[in-house]
Amino acid sequence: MPRLNSHDDFTPLKEVIVGSAANYVGHDRDVSFELFHHENLSGFRSDWAYPRLTRAAAGHRESWTIKARYAEELHEDVEALAATLAGLGVVVHRPLPLPPDAAPIAGLGWEAAPTPALNIRDNTLILGDEIIETPPAIRSRYLETRLLAPVFTTYWEAGARWTTMPRPTLTDNSFDLSYARDTATTLGGPTEAIEDPQPSPYDVGVEMMLDGAQVLRLGRDLVVNVAQENHTRGAEWLQRHLGHQYRVHRVWRMADNHIDSMVLALKPGVFLARHDGIRNLMPEPLRSWRFIVPPEPDAGAFPVYDDYEDLVLTSPYIDLNVLSVDEHTVLVNEECTGLAKLLETEGFVVVPVRHRHRRLFGGGFHCFTLDTHRTGGFEDYLS
Ligand SMILES: NC(=[NH2+])NCCC[C@H](N)C(=O)O
C-alpha cells in the first residue's frame, strides 16, 4: 500500500475508503444527537427538543429504530457504490463492519449505542500524508474511527503520519448552544430552546469539536466552516497544528456544521454550490471562482417517508454531495437528474449511482467516502 496522499477532492482518485452501513439499525437520541441534527430535526417535529433531552441527558437515552427495509436498501446502495469505484479502477478499502447487536459504548457519565463507520468523511481529515482523527460531537459516534483503525494502521505502517485531535468529554456542558438558539426561530419550528444542561462531575466547560467534513481541502488552503465556539476551538487547533504550512480560512456559519452539502470543489476554479450566496461567504480569494448552482431539488426524487416514524436527518440539498473521481468525472445520485444534466452541460462525465435513503442516514457519496490517495500535491490553487 502506498503512503497516504490526499490534498483535494478532484485530482485523480487512486485509493478510497468506502463506509459501511452494516447493522445501521437505529439512532441513539440523546442531547448530542439532537443538537447536531437540530437544523433538520427542528423543522420536522417540535416535541423532540428539551425537556425530552433533559431526560436523555440524565441518562435516559432513547433509541430510535430505523425500518429494516431502509437499512437493507442503504446497505445495498453502499455496497454498489464501493463496486462502482472499484470498477473505475480505484483501490477500495473498507472499515470493520459494525457487528449485529453491538454493545453500547460509554464515556465519562454517558452511554450510547455505536453507529457504523458510514459517514467516514465526518470524523477524519486526510491532509497529504497525515491522518487526523477529529473530535466528534455526537456520543454514539465517539468510537467510530476505531472501525477504521485496521486501514489507518496499514497506512501508518507504510509511512503515513497519524494524529488524533484532543478528545472531548461530551458532558451536557461541553456544548455551545448558540447556533441552535440563534437559528431556532428562523427555521420556523416551534422548537423548545435547550436551556438546562445537566451538571456532571466531569464538566470541563465548552470543548473542542470539529468534523473533518467541516473542512474543504484545496491543497495548501483549507476552508473551515465555524458556527459556534466548539468549532472555533477545533479551527484554532488546526491553525496551530498546520498554520506554518497551510492557510486556514474560517468561514462563519455557512452551515450548521458540515460544509459538503453547501460547496464542493470540482476542479481548480470551479465549485458546485447550493446557492449563489455561497460565493460571498467564501474567503475573498475564492470568490472569483466559478460557482455552479444546481436546480432546486425535486421533491418527487425522494422516497416518501412517514412524518412520525422516519427521522429525516438531511436537507433535500444532500445530492450536491457528489464524489469526483477526477477533474472530469463525477459520481452523482441517479435520482438527481437535474444536477446530472447540468454537469454534463458543463463538460463533466457523470457516473450515475443509486442512493435511495440519503435523507435518512445523514450523507451522500462525499460523506460516505474518505479519499486516501489522489495524485494531486500540496498545490497553491490561489496563485
Ligand atoms: N459529511 C456529511 N455528513 N455531510 C452531510 C451534510 C448534510 C447537511 N447537514 C444537509 O442537511 O444537507
Image: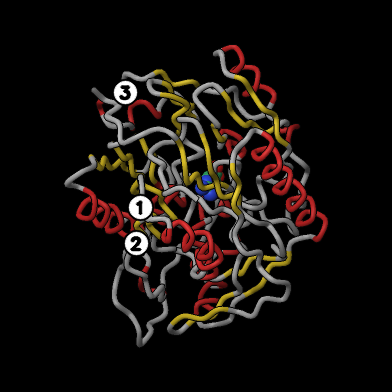
Neighbor class of circle 3 (other Cα within 10 Å; few <14, some 14-19, many 20+) is some
Percent across and percent down for residue 10 are 47, 31
Task: Give the side of residue 212 with respect to residue 332, left or right.
Answer: left
Residue 163's disc is 2
What secondary structure is found at the residue carrying circle 1? strand
The residue that disc 3 covers is 287
Percent across and percent down for residue 262 are 47, 36
Dividing the picture into quadrants, the one containing residue 199 is bottom left
Task: Give the side of residue 260 with respect to residue 229, left or right.
Answer: right
Q: Nearer the viewer, mark 3 or mark 1?
A: 1
Percent across and percent down for residue 139 are 50, 70
Percent across and percent down for residue 8 are 41, 36
Badge 3 or badge 2: first in the primary sequence = 2
Asked if the residue under mark 2 is in contact with the one under mark 3, i.e. CB atoms within 8 Å, the reply is: no
Identify whether 301 is placed above or below 313: above
Ligand 1 near label 2 (Cβ, under 8 Å)? Answer: no
Ligand 1 near label 1 (Cβ, under 8 Å)? Answer: no
Task: Give the side of residue 248 with respect to residue 90, left or right.
Answer: left
Asked if the residue under mark 1 is in contact with the one under mark 2, i.e. CB atoms within 8 Å, the reply is: yes
